Amino acid sequence: VTFRKGAFFSATTFSKGAVFRSITFCNAAQFIDAIIGRSQQSEEKGERSAAQREEKEEGSAIADFRDASFMRPELVSFLRTNQNATCGLRARFANCCIEEVRFDAVRWHRYENRMVLQDELDLLGQSDGALSHEEVAIAYRRMIINFEKVRAYDLVEDCTIGEFEMKRRNPDRFLFAKLLKLDYECCPFLRAIGERASIVGIYHLASLYGTSYQRAMGVLGLLLVAFGLCFSTVVDICPVSIPDKIAACGHLNVFDRMGSGLLHALEVATLQRTPLFESVTTVGRFAEIFEQVLVAGQVALLLFALRRRFRR
């Protein structure tokens, strides 16, 4: 179908979804106050049957714009879409140029506490094998460009997570993808390992792709505690002021060693020039270097997440 003039669906309710796949909009297209799904007003009046309630819960009311063409995207408007609906907007925008489309006050569908496109949910549910991870990642990048222009930074972070999730879950990016491709496809356990044992997987674990300063701060604290326990159990440390350091290591009780290990981990992380404790073995020296590298990287992720979270 080709809409050569305007296509106006303002204040329209699509109770069972709307399919605009591969449609061409040559001019304006407005979905102002439109509802994809059930409206709150109809729910209050009790106009839903048990089957309709089940359908809503399964999320079958989807706005499908996959492969659609917006010839004049600056005239396409999704204003307050699904604001008066019982659920958020489930939309497919893969292979669709949406950088200039207006998305204002849209109530989006949320998954794992973030805005999500239905294209990603299709991949997770394997309901559409024709769609690739990279196509969904491109859709998220286009959404990021759109939201950056209007400074909708919360939505930018949500789409950033979605983009990196597609990279993390893409089997072509797993370790030894060419050699173990069939194994990744057949074994869910290996696939789960492949999704996490990568640079993108570590980025997700360390700071949720640079979007969560809380996670970055928590991981930083865990690193300090882990190295503190290491210095108090595996690695021998002792006060700098004691001449016979090796002999002094065995005279500390358990609680003193734990406190000393945590303090030394903090000293190493903050690059103290005159530490109170030091390692007396080669293994301890390597542990100190390893901690400095990890802590420095985690602090960088923390600062990056703080900058992204509080930018204006």
Image: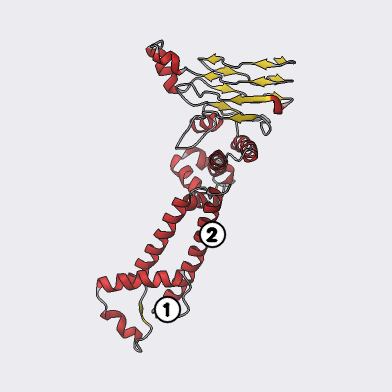
In this rendering, the answer to whether 305 lies above or below 43 is below
Instruction: From the top left corner, tell me how far across and down residue 144 is, in percent.
Output: 61, 39
In this rendering, the answer to whether 95 lies above or below 38 is below
Compare residues 188 and 270 and report the one nearer the observer: 270
- The residue under label 1 is 275
Residue 182 in sight? yes
Give the residue type that dot 2 points to: Ala
Is label 2 in a helix, a strand or a loop? helix
Is label 1 in a helix, a strand or a loop? loop
The numbered mark at residue 222 is none
Q: Looking at the image, tell me whether mark 1 or mark 2 is earlier in sequence order.
A: 1
- The residue under label 2 is 300
Sort mark 1 into few (<14), some (14-19) or many (20+) by Cα contacts within 10 Å: some
Instruction: From the top left corner, tell me how far across and down residue 223 is, in percent.
Output: 42, 61
Compare residues 37 and 279 and report the one nearer the observer: 37
In this rendering, the answer to whether 210 lies above or below 140 is below
Q: Which of the 4 quarters of the picture holds residue 166?
A: top right
Please name the residue shown 42% across and 72% down the image: 267
Instruction: From the top left corner, tell me how far across and down residue 212 is, in percent.
Output: 48, 48
Q: Are marks 1 and 2 in contact (CB under 8 Å)?
A: no
In space, the residues marked 1 and 2 are separated at their CA atoms by 23 Å
Indicate left or right for 251 with 146 as reference: left
